[in-house]
Image: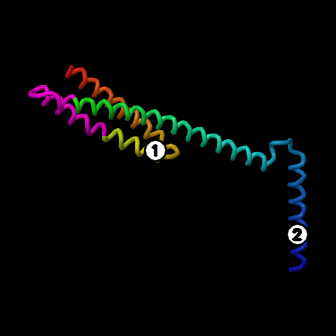
Amino acid sequence: MKGLLLPVLLGLALNVSAAEKREEGVPPGTGSTDVRKEAGEAIDAATTKARQERDEFVDKAQKEMAELNKKMAELRKKAKKLSGEAKAKLDRQIQNLEPELKAAEQKLADLKSATGEKWKELKAGVSGAIGRLKQSMQKTREGDS
């Protein structure tokens, strides 16, 4: 057993010494520690950028949703002032818009808590829902003018 231990320890010492010499001969910034550090910094930067992009999109979408909610309130207020067939028509249109509005709000809520690649998928859903809602409201406003 003693005869086996000495060669193993000697081999380990030589491997450590060789690894240290390899690190010494490596140009600055290319050692394994430096590469790991740079990779970590790159990941942090990408994560920060993605978070910032998501936050900017969420802010924009929230502003659009606030504007759409305001327009919906205006339509409801207008419907209260109308009577007869005009009121019935606008009430139906509002009823059709409400589920779209709720769906867009839910998608935005889901997006706020999403991370990683999931938020990119949800971003498309939020954009589409807001776009469809804007078109529907525009048609409603044009139709009752």
Q: Position of residue 112 (x, y in %)?
A: 46, 44
In this view, the mark in front (1 or 2): 1
Is residue 80 shown left or right of residue 101? left
**Chain-order first, disc 1 or disc 2:** 2
The N terminus - image quarter = bottom right
Q: Name which quarter of the figure residue 132 lies in.
A: top left
Give me the residue at 90% from left, 73% from top: 6
Q: CA distance from mark 1 to mark 2?
A: 56 Å
- The image quarter containing residue 28 is top right
- Percent x, y for residue 136? 27, 28
- Comparing 19 with 61, the one in front is 61
Decide which of 137, 40 is in the foreground and name it.
137
Span shown in magenta: 78-101
Residue shown at 38%/34% (left/top)? 66
Amino acid carrying label 2: it is: Leu
Question: Which residue is label 1 attached to?
Answer: 112
Q: Amino acid at mark 1?
A: Lys
Residue ID for mark 2: 9
